[in-house]
Image (cartoon, rainbow, N blue to C red):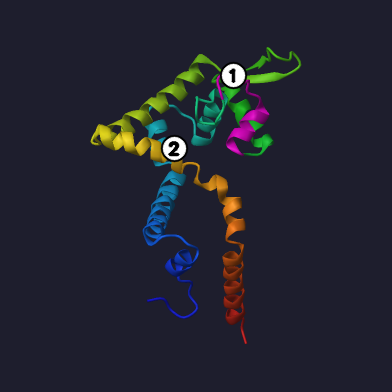
Amino acid sequence: MNRPGNIDINTLLRKAGIAEETADAVIGIDALLQNWRRRAMKRELGHRALVDLKIGIDLAQYDVLVAIEAPVGEFGETLGTETMVATVAERLNIDPSRASRVVSEMVELGYARRAVSQADARRTIIELTDAGRTIVEAVRAYKFLIMGDFLSSWTAEDLAVFMPLLRKFGHWSENSEQAADKFADDIALLAQQIAAGRKQAEPV
């Protein structure tokens, strides 16, 4: 039972026209994603791969190697895109100065090199050396072995259903702005409830 002043999520969703079954799914999926996010932030599998493969670099450095290589599908780009330091920063959503520093570290370690753009000779691009590419491929292979072992217990029918649905679900946040506009009144009410809660919390 909800305490007075608390927001009843189920009532809110039903009032917004979201079916009870969908509301239950939303709540359950969010709980799973939050748990997944916390585990993903720890990068447990990535840490283990770097240790087990005895690579000798950290995850931030590995991420830069991946951003330089840009495996198909990971950054929504196609093959043939030239990579610059600014590209690495954009792909990883990090500060350009940080991207420049880590790229330089990878160059010094022999995992990346600077080259001249084929499209514009005035432009410096970054590419992996054979050693750097081997690291990216080895870590991805490690991850795929672990994931492949887990998915081996799934049936072909499970996989055939799961993959299209996962791709579809991967786009759910893209319409968040339109959804926020659609539920502007409900969101305004939630903001009012927050403001009222703050007022009650103020010392007398």
> Which corner quadrant of the image does residue 203 belong to?
bottom right
Give the residue at x 42% y 67%.
10
> Which corner quadrant of the image does residue 109 belong to?
top right
Query: Is residue 7 rendered to the left or right of residue 125?
Result: left
Q: Are the residues tagged 1 and 2 within 8 Å (C-beta)?
A: no
Residue 8 in the image, given as x and y percentages of width and height:
45, 71
Residue placed under numbered mark 1 in the picture: 127
Nearest the eye: 145 or 60: 145
Label 2 environment density (alpha carbons within 10 Å; few <14, some 14–19, many ≥20): few
Residue placed under numbered mark 2 in the picture: 167
Residue 150 visible to the viewer: no
Region in magenta: 78-93
Amino acid type shown at disc 2: Arg
Residue 79 circle label: none
SS category of the residue bearing label 2 = helix
Amino acid type shown at disc 1: Glu
